[in-house]
Image (cartoon, rainbow, N blue to C red):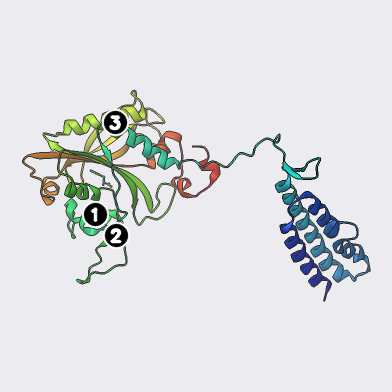
Amino acid sequence: MSILQQLEELKTQALCELAAVEDNKKLDLWRVQYMGKKSRLNEVLRGLSALSIEEKKTVGATANQLKLELESALKEKELSLGEKVISAKGEETIDITLPGRKPPVGRLHPISQVIDEMCRIFVSMGFQAVEGPEVEWDYYNFDMLNIPKEHPARDNMQTLWVDYENEKGERPMLLRTHTSPMQVRVMEKIKPPLRIVVPGKVYRYEAIDATHIPMFTQIEGLAVDKGITLADLKGTLYEFARRYFGSDRKARFRCDFFPFVEPGVEMSIECIVCKGAGCRLCSNSGWLEILGAGMVHPRVLEGVGIDSSVYSGFAFGMGIERIPMLRYGIDDIRLFYGGDLRFLRQF
Ligand code: PHE
C-alpha cells in the first residue's frame, strides 16, 4: 500500500473512531493514538525528508491536510463534550454553571410581516382575510373578470401557462397573474354583504432585474353590499394609507383602466423620499403609485349571480414588495427572495 493510501485509510479510521468517542477520557486516548508523537501521522511527517522531491510534495501536502482536518474535528468534538466534566467520584456530569447556548430563533420573512400588518389594518375595518389557489383556471383569472380570450389586457399580463390540456385541446390552467380571481371565487360562495382581503403570491413571465421578478405578492380587497359607492372605496383606502404610511402622508386618486372595474382608479401616495418635491424615485412627479382599484364591474357581479341593480362593490389590488422597498429604501426586489440572512435578519 502506498503512503497516500495509508493516509487515506488512517483518515477514515481516525474520523470513525472520533465519532464514537463519548467522553473526555476516550478523547485523550484518541488524541494520543492519532495525533500524538508516536502516531502514524507523525511518523509519516517525520519520514518526509527521506523521500524524493516529487513524493515530498504530494505526501507532504496530503499529510499536512490530514493533520488540519483531524485538528478541526478534534476541536469540534472538544466543544461538544465541553459541558461534560468528571465529578470527584469519576462520573460524568453536566456543568450547570456554564452559560446556556442560545437556540437559533427564526423570524417571519419581511414580506410576511408586511402582509400581517396590512391584514390587521383591514381586519380592524371589518374585512376578513382569505387565501386562494396559486394555480388557477383561465376562467377565474380572466374570463370571469371581464377579460375575454381576445382582450388586449391579456397581453400585458405575461401569463405563465401550466402544461395541461383539456379534451377540447385548450390550455386553460395558469399561475394566477393577480389575486383578483379570488373576487370571483369568494362571490360564488358568499352572498353579500361581504368584505374580504386576499394576500398571496402571483406570477408573471418577466425578465428578472432590480424591479421585476416572476413571482411577487399582492393583496386584493373586495367589498360588496347595497349602496356601496366610490366614496366608500376612497374612505377605506385613505384610512389604510393614514394608518400604514402615517397621517401626514398625502394620497390621491386618478383615473385608470382595469376591465373588471368601472370606473377604475389608481391610488398614489406622496413620494416617501422627497415628500412631493420631485426626485429620481418618483421620476420628478412627487407621487408613487401603489395600487389599482375601482367599482366592481356589473358584468363581474352578474357573472356570479349577484343582481347589479341591487348590489354594488369596490375592489382594489396592491403589490406588496414595493411597499417595504419604498419604506426602507431597498433598491433591489431580488433581495427578498435571495435567502441571504444578512438581509433578512434586518427585519
Ligand atoms: N388586479 C389588478 C392588477 O394586478 C389590480 C386591481 C385589483 C385593479 C382590483 C382594480 C381592482 O394590476
Query: In the rendered image, which residue does mark 1 sit on?
Result: 141
Residue matched to label 3 = 124
Measure the alpha-carbon separation of dots 3 and 1.
Answer: 28 Å
- The 10 Å Cα crowd at callout 2, few under 14, some 14 to 19, many 20 or more, is some
Q: In the image, is the residue at mark 3 within 8 Å of ligand 1 by its beta carbon?
A: no
Q: Is residue 308 above or below residue 21?
A: above
Q: Which type of secondary structure does the marked residue at label 1 adopt?
A: helix
Query: Which corner quadrant holds the N terminus?
Result: bottom right
Q: Which residue is most to the bottom?
A: 1
Question: For residue 310, what is the image quadrant?
Answer: top left
Numbered tag placed on residue 286 in the rendering: none
Closest to the camera, between mark 2 and mark 3, is 3
Residue at the image position 83 percent from the left and 55 percent from the top: 29
Q: Choose the circle earlier in sequence order: 2 or 1.
A: 1
Q: Residue furthest top?
A: 248
Q: Residue at x 64, y 39 (%)?
A: 101
Give me the residue at 61% from left, 39% from top. Answer: 102
Disc 3 element: helix
Q: Residue at x 76, y 42 (%)?
A: 85
Q: Residue furthest left?
A: 309
Is residue 4 depicted above or below 311 in this figure? Answer: below
Q: Earlier in the sequence, mark 2 or mark 3?
A: 3
Is 268 positioned to the left or the right of 232 in the image? right
Q: Are marks 2 and 1 in contact (CB under 8 Å)?
A: yes
Mark 3 or mark 1: which comes first in sequence? 3
As drawn, 239 above or below 192 = above
Between 275 and 290, the one nearer to me in the picture: 290
Mark 2 Cβ and ligand 1 under 8 Å apart: no
- How many dots with numbers? 3
Q: Quick one: 17 or 319, which is closer to the camera?
A: 17
Which kind of residue does numbered mark 2 sit on? Answer: Leu
Check disc 1 and give the amino acid type. Asn
